[in-house]
Amino acid sequence: MTQSSTNYSIELLTEKRIEELFKEHYAVLTAYAHKFLSDLDDAREIVQNVFVQLIDHKDTVKIHTSAKAHLYTSVRNACLNAIKQKNTHAKHHENIKYLNSDIGTGVDKILEQTELEYELYQAIDELPEQCQRIFKMNRFDGFTNQEIADQLGISKRTVETQISKALKILRNKIGPMLASLLILWLMEKM
């Protein structure tokens, strides 16, 4: 051990010291990891990997606390990373399973819906400026007609007229094929 200028002890690791730490702490660290992972094989693998990392980086690892505290922290962090990775994999697996299932929406339907929504957003972006602004405030931001009128300093009737105008333009632009999507989409936004 060496002393640093701040009176903290820093332990430099050698292969012999790592071997001693392994013999002394492997079993208890495995039990500790098992509490996180609930799988003994995974726990053993995590602990072994922590020691492999110590050997691989022995020249650069400087332990500012005790070796035991460093090992526990390393094992805990490795377990948390493994849990996070496992949850991410499970989530992706569920998403893929859902997309491929007969119960869920098929990939073709998702693509079709995405294309339809894109066309709808394009049509909204092509509305006249005031009409577009009022429509978005109502449908996207959830403001009532009176709230829009108050914010813009116009009458409630003007707001209603502009929303009606927007709906008419959108119906004409996106056509009958998209009418059902538009109705469902607008109902969700209300």
Image (cartoon, grey):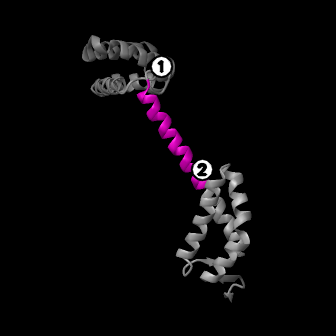
Front-lying residue, 163 or 55? 55
Residue 78: quadrant of the picture: bottom right
Q: Secondary structure at mark 1?
A: helix
Q: Which span is picked out in magenta?
A: 80-101
Percent x, y of residue 23:
70, 73
Of the residues shown, which amino acid type is indicated by label 1? Glu
> Which numbered mark, 2 or 1, is in the foreground of this view?
2
Mark-to-mark CA distance, 2 and 1: 36 Å
Please tell me whether residue 93 belongs to the stretch shown in magenta.
yes
Circle 2 crowding by C-alpha within 10 Å: few under 14, some 14–19, many from 20: some
Q: With respect to residue 97, does 36 lie above or below?
A: below
Q: Earlier in the sequence, mark 2 or mark 1?
A: 2
Percent x, y of residue 92:
48, 40
Please tell me whether residue 31 belongs to the stretch shown in magenta.
no
- Left or right for 172, reference 109: left
The residue pinned by badge 2 equals: 83
Percent x, y of residue 43:
64, 57
Of the residues shown, which amino acid type is indicated by label 2? Ile
Q: Can residue 155 be seen at all in this image of the molecule? A: no
Front-lying residue, 158 or 20? 20
The residue pinned by badge 1 equals: 188
